[in-house]
């Protein structure tokens, strides 16, 4: 609990992953991808209940073996390629009522740590915000991004009176990193989205903001984590 408010954490993990088959239980540096998120969530100071939402029996068994609850089977219609990401969360908070805050923890952010989870929640509560989501500083400034129109004509995404030509002159821009989403539950049920004009951001460092979406992401993380583990063992 935080300030006498109860907290439900949900890890959504469907079985049908296209980019990386069986991604959520594929081993990353010695343990299933989903286990990285379960382990950190279990270290949280505030989470009252940690559940995994899945329609997949094997994912459910792996999740339970790493210490998460799987109190229900997600309906198959909420586990399709085109299922909006918010729908399994709304389903879970309906099945498990009487919590004040919900935290969405995607298993594709394995480098997120318990301190990130707790700090995002603290920021949401302390600032009396309806929702708080994690972001990170982007490497690519939107001031250097373009749309291609009319046979490859370049149109700036952000049109400014004076072009910004040097990287150090561009204002900081932040991008969602997908690691932590926090919301007041009654508010989320009204808005059906974590992202709203009332949502605030919690900044995470780039080194903990890697999102596993493709096989290249997976292989990169595998190499990175193996090197980190080897370096730690040598000390």
Image (spheres, rainbow, N blue to C red):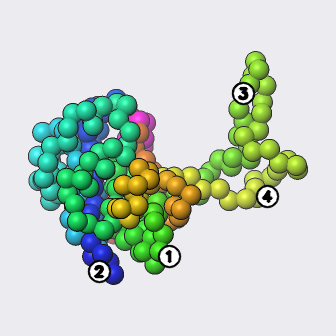
Q: Is 63 or 91 nearer to us in this picture?
A: 91
Residue carrying label 1: 127
Residue behind mark 2:
4
Binning the other alpha carbons within 10 Å of mark 1 as few (below 14), some (14 to 19) or many (20 upward) gives few
Label 3 to label 2, Cα distance in Å? 51 Å
3 or 1: mark nearer the eye: 1
Q: CA distance from mark 4 to mark 2?
A: 45 Å
Question: Picture coordinates of residue 61 (x, y %)?
Answer: 11, 46
Tell which circle, 3 or 2, labels the residue nearer the N-terminal end. Answer: 2
Assess whether mark 2 and mark 3 are in contact (beta carbons under 8 angstroms): no
Q: Quadrant of residue 8?
A: bottom left
Is 115 magenta? The answer is no
As measured in the structure, the alpha-carbon distance from the residue carrying label 3 to the one carrying label 1 is 40 Å
Contact, mark 3 vs mark 1 (Cβ under 8 Å): no
**Going 12% across and 39% down the picture, which residue do you hit?**
57
Q: Which mark is nearer the camera, 1 or 4?
A: 1
Q: Secondary structure at mark 1?
A: loop
Q: Which residue is mark 3?
A: 148
Residue at disc 2, secondary structure: loop
Frontmost residue, 185 versus 134: 185
Mark 4 and mark 2 lie on one chain; the one further toward the N terminus is: 2
Marks 3 and 2: which is nearer the front?
2
Give the mark nearer the N terminus: 4 vs 3.
Answer: 3
Going from N to C along the chain, the mark reached first, 3 or 1, is 1
- The answer to which of 110 and 63 lies nearer the viewer is 63
What residue range appears in magenta?
Answer: 214-221
Q: Is residue 129 above or below residue 215?
A: below
Separation (CA) of disc 1 from disc 2: 16 Å
**Nearer-N-terminus badge (1/4):** 1
Q: Which mark is residue 169?
A: 4
């Amino acid at each position: 609990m935080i300030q006498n408010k109860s907290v439900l954490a949900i890890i959504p993990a469907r079985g049908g992953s296209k980019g990386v088959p069986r991604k959520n239980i594929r081993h990353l540096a010695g343990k299933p991808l989903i286990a990285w998120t379960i382990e950190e969530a279990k270290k949280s100071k505030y989470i009252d209940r940690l559940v995994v939402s899945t329609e997949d029996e094997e994912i459910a068994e792996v999740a339970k073996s790493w210490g998460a609850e799987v109190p229900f089977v997600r309906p198959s219609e909420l586990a399709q390629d085109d299922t909006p990401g918010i729908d399994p969360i709304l389903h879970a908070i309906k099945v498990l009522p009487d919590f004040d805050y919900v935290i969405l923890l995607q298993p594709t952010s394995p480098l997120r740590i318990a301190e990130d989870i707790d700090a995002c929640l603290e920021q949401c509560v302390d600032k009396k915000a309806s929702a708080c989501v994690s972001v990170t500083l982007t490497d690519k400034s939107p001031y250097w991004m373009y749309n291609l129109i009319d046979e490859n004509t370049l149109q700036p995404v952000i049109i400014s009176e004076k072009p910004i030509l040097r990287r150090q002159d561009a204002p900081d821009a932040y991008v969602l990193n997908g690691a932590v989403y926090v919301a007041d539950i009654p508010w989320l049920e009204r808005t059906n989205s974590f992202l709203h004009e009332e949502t605030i951001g919690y900044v995470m460092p780039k080194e903990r903001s890697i999102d596993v979406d493709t096989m290249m992401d997976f292989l990169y993380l595998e190499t990175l984590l193996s090197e980190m583990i080897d370096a730690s063992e040598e000390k």
